[in-house]
Amino acid sequence: MNNNLRFILKTTGIHILTYILCGIIFSTIFSYDRLFAMNGGDGFMKDVGGSSTLLGPLVQVIRGILFGVVLLLFKDTFMGKKY
């Protein structure tokens, strides 16, 4: 597999994993379901079980690929030199 493609796939995988893990951790810490149930909470938060919330991890694939491509452009700048 091409090194550039491998880099993009790794970046995408790490992005998706951290997105899901941080979502689970912070929704538990801040009790998103309880906050949403409060009066007026639906004005600034999506429902925890809503369709847009469930589609979030799937959309992160596109975002991860974009991150991978952008980071690939700067890869040599960060990883190719000793500081």
Image (cartoon, helix red, strand yellow):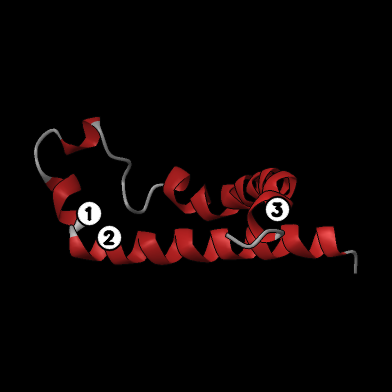
Q: Earlier in the sequence, mark 3 or mark 1?
A: 1
The amino acid at mark 2 is Phe
| In front: label 2 or label 1 | 2
Q: Are marks 3 and 1 in contact (CB under 8 Å)?
A: no
Q: Nearer the viewer, residue 82 or 74?
A: 82
Mark carried by residue 32: 1
Vertical arrangement, residue 56 with respect to residue 18, above or below: above
Work out how far the residue at label 2 is from the one at label 1, CA to CA, in angstroms: 8 Å
Q: Earlier in the sequence, mark 2 or mark 1?
A: 2
Work out how far the residue at label 3 is from the one at label 2, CA to CA, in angstroms: 30 Å
| In front: label 3 or label 1 | 3
| Residue depicted at x 55% and y 60% | 16
In the picture, measured across the screen, residue 83 lies left or right of residue 3, that is: left
Mark carried by residue 68: none
Quadrant where the C terminus is found in the figure: bottom right
Q: Using a 10 Å C-alpha cutoff, classify the residue at mark 1 as few (fewer than 14 neighbours), some (14 to 19) or many (20 or more).
A: some
| Residue depicted at x 27% and y 59% | 27
Mark carried by residue 26: 2
In the picture, measured across the screen, residue 54 lies left or right of residue 82, that is: left
Under tag 2, what secondary structure?
helix
In the picture, measured across the screen, residue 68 lies left or right of residue 36, that is: right
Under tag 3, what secondary structure?
helix
Residue beneath disc 3: 75
x and y percent of residue 23 in the render?
37, 59
x and y percent of residue 31 in the render?
18, 59
Quadrant where the N terminus is found in the figure: bottom right
Work out how far the residue at label 3 is from the one at label 1, CA to CA, in angstroms: 37 Å
The amino acid at mark 3 is Lys
| Extreme residue toward the right, this view | 1
x and y percent of residue 68 in the render?
68, 51
